Image (spheres, grey):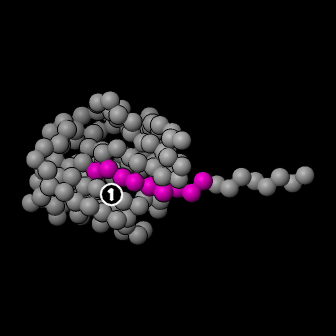
Amino acid sequence: MKKLLHSAAIPAPKFRYTPCVQSGPHFSISGMVGLDPATGQLVAGGPAAETQRIFDNLKLALPDYGLSLQNMTLARIYTTDFAAFGQINAAWDAMFADIAPPARTSLGVQALPLGATVEIEFAFYQPQPALAADTE
């Protein structure tokens, strides 16, 4: 069984997709680009600013999905500017400075939606709480 999850804290999808899909203890978060939650527009500043905005948006949405960064198992980073990967990696290092980072794949691509230079998708694992034992 799968659940389709949304968060009012982040910009609504620009296209037809579900931002987060839960299947049992597994959660897949659709690729995010650096959209400003106030305007819904791509942030200015290139890969560094876009990556930071993606991480900021992710942190805004996680409570609505019932997740925390510690539950992240995988991130896939797509960029149109691999020459600027150091900027992306600096934001990554700051994001995971205090917790173990997840597995990661990084890909260079020709183009991304909305003219973005960075898109990141995420996978999470959140074991479901055990049901309370019947005390009768």
Identity of the residue drawn at 32% across and 29% down: 16
Residue 88 belongs to magenta span: no
Instruction: Give the residue number, with chain letter if any, for mark 1.
Output: 75
Please name the predominant secondary structure of the magenta segment in the image. Answer: strand
Q: Can the viewer see residue 69? A: no
Vertical comparison of 18 with 89: above or below: above
> In the rendered view, does 51 fall on the left or right side of 79?
right
Tell me where residue 60 sits by quadrant. top left
Determine whether the residue tagged by mark 1 lies in a helix, strand or loop.
Answer: strand
Question: In this orientation, does residue 103 appear?
Answer: yes
**Residue 69 percent location from the top left of the image:** 44, 58
Horizontal side of 7 relative to 49 (left or right) equals: right
Residue 116, above or below 136: above
Query: In front here: 125 or 59?
Result: 125
x, y (%) of residue 113? Answer: 19, 38
Q: Is residue 54 left or right of residue 106?
A: right
Q: Position of residue 55 (x, y in %)?
A: 33, 52
Q: How many marks?
A: 1
Q: Quadrant of the N terminus?
A: top right
Image position, residue 22 (x, y; %): 48, 45
Which residues fall within the magenta stretch?
120-128
The residue at 17%/42% (across/down) is: 112
**Residue type pointed to by label 1:** Ala
